[in-house]
């Protein structure tokens, strides 16, 4: 699949894309908000579970990287980036709107939590890095406050996780991808 095809598939068939391809988002320089990203095909093969038999029938896939600059080349597109913030300060969630970019990314999750707050027919999102607490303690604390959280415990036992937001038909939905230490896809799911 070409880079433009990868961008299109991620927008139109996000779960299918995340099941079949490894995605590595790199932190955008600057603040949370709209950024130009570059979809880069790393020309690396990955393995992924089969749709019906899971790991009993592994398949191959491609590895793509989302970069905030074109130093390595790639195809440009606009997306929202939710920058990571320490967990020991007030949560300032970023509101996802019904206009503009239809994709939202965070950096890879290796211990962090994503907070998704519904309201006004949309969501606000924050990416929190455990500061003075473990990832599991952060997740439990946020859950106790009745936030919708994706964090340690949701992706335990894998090397890393990726969370992607996609606006479909005017409504934001969230998808995850779990990867091992070698960027092989272990699982992908729609969260909302």
Image (spheres, rainbow, N blue to C red):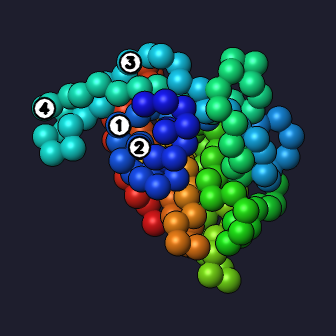
Query: Mark 1 = which residue?
Result: 20
Q: How many labels, in total?
A: 4
Query: Mark 2 = which residue?
Result: 17
Query: Mark 4 = which residue?
Result: 56
Q: Where does residue 52 sit, x and y in percent of width and height?
A: 15, 45
Q: CA distance from mark 1 to mark 3?
A: 11 Å
Query: Mark 3 = which residue?
Result: 45
Please report whichever mark, 1 or 3, sits nearer to the chain's N-terminal start.
Answer: 1
- The residue nearer to you, when weighing 188 against 145, is 188
Please report whichever mark, 3 or 4, sits nearer to the chain's N-terminal start.
Answer: 3
Q: CA distance from mark 4 to mark 1?
A: 16 Å
Please report whichever mark, 3 or 2, sits nearer to the chain's N-terminal start.
Answer: 2
Task: Identify the secondary structure beneath mark 1.
Answer: helix
| Residue 155 appears in the rendering | no
- The residue nearer to you, when weighing 98 against 106, is 98
Can you tell which of label 2 and label 4 is closer to the viewer? 2
Q: Where does residue 29 sit, x and y in percent of width and height?
A: 83, 35
Task: Determine the image quadrant of residue 26.
Answer: top right
Q: Residue at x 52, y 66 (%)?
A: 168
Q: CA distance from mark 3 to mark 2?
A: 15 Å
Disc 3 vs disc 2: Cβ atoms closer than 8 Å?
A: no
Q: How would you rate the neighbour count of disc 1 (Cα within 10 Å): few for under 14, some for 14-19, many for 20 or more?
A: many
Disc 2 vs disc 1: Cβ atoms closer than 8 Å?
A: yes
Please report whichever mark, 2 or 4, sits nearer to the chain's N-terminal start.
Answer: 2
Q: Residue at x 37, y 32 (%)?
A: 185
Q: Where does residue 189 sit, x and y in percent of width and height?
A: 37, 52
């Amino acid at each position: 699949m070409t880079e433009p095809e990868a961008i299109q598939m991620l927008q139109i068939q996000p779960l299918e894309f995340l099941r079949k391809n490894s995605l590595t988002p790199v932190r955008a320089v600057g603040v949370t908000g709209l950024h130009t990203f570059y979809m880069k095909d790393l020309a690396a093969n990955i393995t992924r579970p089969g749709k019906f038999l899971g790991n009993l029938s592994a398949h191959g896939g491609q590895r793509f990287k989302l970069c905030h600059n074109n130093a390595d080349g790639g195809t440009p597109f606009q997306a929202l980036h939710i920058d990571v913030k320490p967990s020991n300060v007030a949560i300032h969630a970023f509101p996802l709107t019904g206009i503009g970019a239809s994709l939202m990314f965070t950096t890879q999750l290796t211990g962090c939590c994503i907070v998704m707050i519904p309201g006004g027919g949309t969501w606000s999102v924050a990416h929190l890095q455990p500061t003075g607490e473990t990832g599991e303690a952060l997740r439990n604390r946020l859950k106790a406050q009745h936030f919708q959280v994706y964090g340690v415990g949701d992706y335990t036992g894998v090397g890393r996780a990726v969370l992607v937001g996609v606006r479909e038909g005017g409504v934001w939905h969230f998808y995850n991808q779990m990867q091992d230490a070698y960027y092989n896809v272990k699982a992908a799911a729609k969260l909302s």
